[in-house]
Amino acid sequence: MLTIGVLASGRGSNFQSIIDSIDSGFLKAKIAVLITDNPDAYAIERAKKHNIESLVLKPKDFTDKNAYYSCIAEELKMRGVELVILAGFMRVVGKALIDQYRNKIMNIHPALLPSFPGLHGQKQAVDYGVKISGCTVHFVDEGMDTGAIIIQAAVPVYHDDTEDTLSERILKQEHKIFPYAIRLYSEGRISVEGRKVIIKGGREDSLLINPP
Ligand code: GRF
């Protein structure tokens, strides 16, 4: 069974969607640990409720970024983590972790990348006036939301949308495609060729207009 480690900084609704997918049997995986940089993250409560170990590791307690991410990598390795999930982890991950988990770190971003990377992807989409936005699950590389794209889901953007209304519409899709991407990975159906992610046995699986 796939062993995953989750990194989250905040409320952890994506973390919860992964927990729920495991509980329902949709996803056959085990969450070994939650690591957070924020002692007040609500994700910690969610971990407690489900008997998942949580670790608070604050960057300011480390000499530099390299020491911080080396420590995270070590904690993950120690617990046999095979796939790292960034579920609202609000930092650009350091090379020390990426090198240890190349093409084994997934992030979810609330826009259709490469549009609107960085913070507030939903607000950027509303302000720009696009008619379609969505969310993207991608592998993490050294850049900001630049890694190879695994799955995207699209949602409409209405002229009277606000950041909040669009965020809510997108979040519903996030909660579907993130567990789905992890499931594809756990089934060994994902491979990476340069920038392209190949999903074995179903090329339609990578764009979900109305995810199941
Ligand atoms: C989500 O919108 C996700 O796309 C972004 O950060 C937010 C995290 O939300 N990366 P939650 O903590 O999972 O509820």
Image: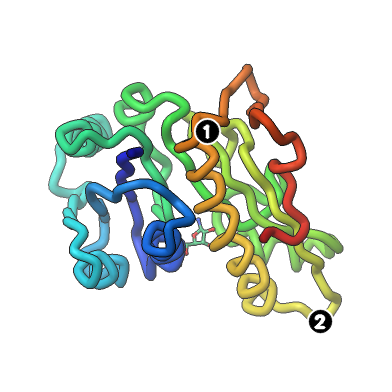
Q: Camera-side residue: 104 or 65? A: 104
Picture residue at 65% right of the left edge, 55% below the top: 135
Judging by the rendered image, the residue that carries numbered circle 2 is 160
Closer to the N terminus: mark 1 or mark 2?
A: 1
Q: Quadrant of the N terminus?
A: top left
Residue labelled 2 has its Cβ within 8 Å of some atom of ligand 1: no
Q: Are marks 1 and 2 in contact (CB under 8 Å)?
A: no
* 170 left or right, relative to 64: right
Picture residue at 61% right of the left edge, 69% below the top: 172
Relative image position of residue 6 (x, y in whole percent): 33, 50
The type of colouring in the image is: rainbow
- Write down the quadrant of residue 160 in the picture: bottom right
Furthest residue toward front: 25
Label 2: which secondary element: loop
Judging by the rendered image, the residue that carries numbered circle 1 is 143
Q: Camera-side residue: 28 or 52? A: 28
Label 1: few (<14), some or many (≥20) within 10 Å? few
Relative image position of residue 62 (x, y in whole percent): 15, 41
Label 1: which secondary element: loop
Residue labelled 1 has its Cβ within 8 Å of some atom of ligand 1: no
Amino acid at circle 2: Asp
Q: Considering only vertical position in the picture, is 41 above or below 102?
A: below
